[in-house]
Image: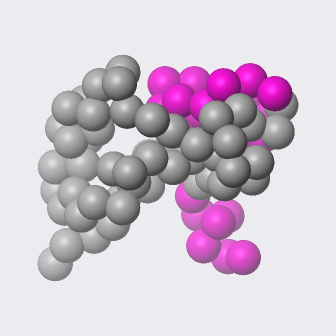
Amino acid sequence: MTTLVQLSCASLRSKSSYAAYGEFHEEHADLMGATATYWCLKTMSKAGPDDHYVHRSICQEGRSCWESCDAGAQR
């Protein structure tokens, strides 16, 4: 079975966010590299609600606007 896996914050998106990763999602995330373009669903821009840029490396638990992927499923 193929599972869609979300990386980092539930509001973080990139074109790769919609790929099916299966068991290799961590390896695929490493292949995206620093050139992937990200946006925040809360602002629909390259900056989050806290006015800081969004990226897989910084949109993680501890950031003031971070949202758990589990919480997003309960909307």
**Above or below — where is 71 with respect to 41?**
below
| In magenta stretch: residue 56 | yes
Q: Is residue 62 visible?
A: no
Region of the chain picked out in magenta, as a range? 51-75
Residue depicted at x 67% and y 76%:
74
**Above or below — where is 2 with respect to 45?**
below
**Above or below — where is 20 with respect to 34?**
below
Screen quadrant of the N terminus = bottom left
Viewer-closest of 74 and 15: 15
Residue 70 position, x and y percent, is: 59, 63
**Side of 21 where 37 appears, left or right:** right
Residue 12 position, x and y percent, is: 57, 46
Residue depicted at x 58% and y 43%:
39
Residue depicted at x 66% and y 25%:
53
Residue 35 position, x and y percent, is: 35, 24
Screen quadrant of the C terminus = bottom right
**Side of 35 where 42 appears, left or right:** right
